Image (cartoon, rainbow, N blue to C red):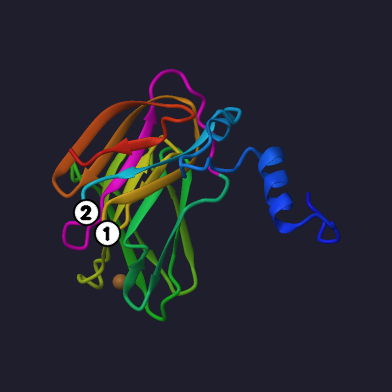
Amino acid sequence: MIRPSSRRSGLTLALFACLVSAACTSTSGEPDASATAAPDTGIQNVTGQAPPSQGNYPAIVVLEPIGGTTLPPQTVPPKMDQEQQTFIPSILLARTGQPVDFFNHDDVLHNVRVKDDETKESAFNVAIPTGEKYTFTFAKDGFYDVGCDIHPGMSAQILSSSSPWSVVADASGAFSIAGVPNGPYKAIAYAGAQTIEHEVNIAAGATTVDLTK
Ligand SMILES: [Cu+2]
């Protein structure tokens, strides 16, 4: 908004920018009240803390809307690839009722065996030749174990959720989920054998979720 050709001094420019953007801080260093009173867009970036990784398993955080919210469909199918006898990623977040693509970009045949972690029922078990793809749609929310019968060392995990608002936390447990509409949610952290749940109300100024306990 401020042209480089302006003849105002730097200080005047800073004050001017402060006045027009309401993004300045007061002299005490605290955020100015006018900055926090920015109009509520109704869509928030939710951040928070879950328990730290346990072994190689970082926490997974899901925000499940409470009530009759229409959930936006996925725009791009999530994908799991196989390269160098490894499933990539090792944890995949999928949407229940929407397709997931399984690729084989390895130079050997793999078979992908996926079963419901809770019931141990098979979801599917298919051989995927080099360069090919298999598409599957999970019908039910839950954790799924992924393996390859040809290479017993290969394993991965899929969480299928109806909610589009899920994320794998970093090793410290910190997480961030963008594009969350205002409203009540069940916030869930899956951390090793632990499941931590809280009901939260997401709104402007209420975008931090503590799922450590
Ligand atoms: Cu394999």
Q: Are marks 2 and 1 in contact (CB under 8 Å)?
A: yes
Q: Position of residue 115 (x, y in %)?
A: 25, 49
Residue 73 in view of the camera: yes
Marker disc for residue 22: none
**Residue extent of the magenta highlight:** 52-74
Marker disc for residue 171: 1
Q: Nearer the viewer, residue 91 or 117?
A: 91
Element assignment for label 2? loop
Q: Main secondary structure of the magenta part?
A: loop
Q: Amino acid at mark 2?
A: Pro
Q: Nearer the viewer, residue 66 or 154?
A: 66
Q: Position of residue 152 (x, y in %)?
A: 20, 70
Q: Amino acid at mark 1?
A: Ala
Give the residue furthest to the top. 67
Give the residue furthest to the left. 193
Q: Position of residue 147 (x, y in %)?
A: 26, 62
Q: Residue at x 45, y 74 (%)?
A: 105
Element assignment for label 1? loop
Q: Which corner quadrant holds the C terminus?
A: top left
- Relative to 173, say whether 195 is above or below: above
How far is mark 2 from mark 1, CA to CA?
A: 5 Å
Marker disc for residue 52: 2
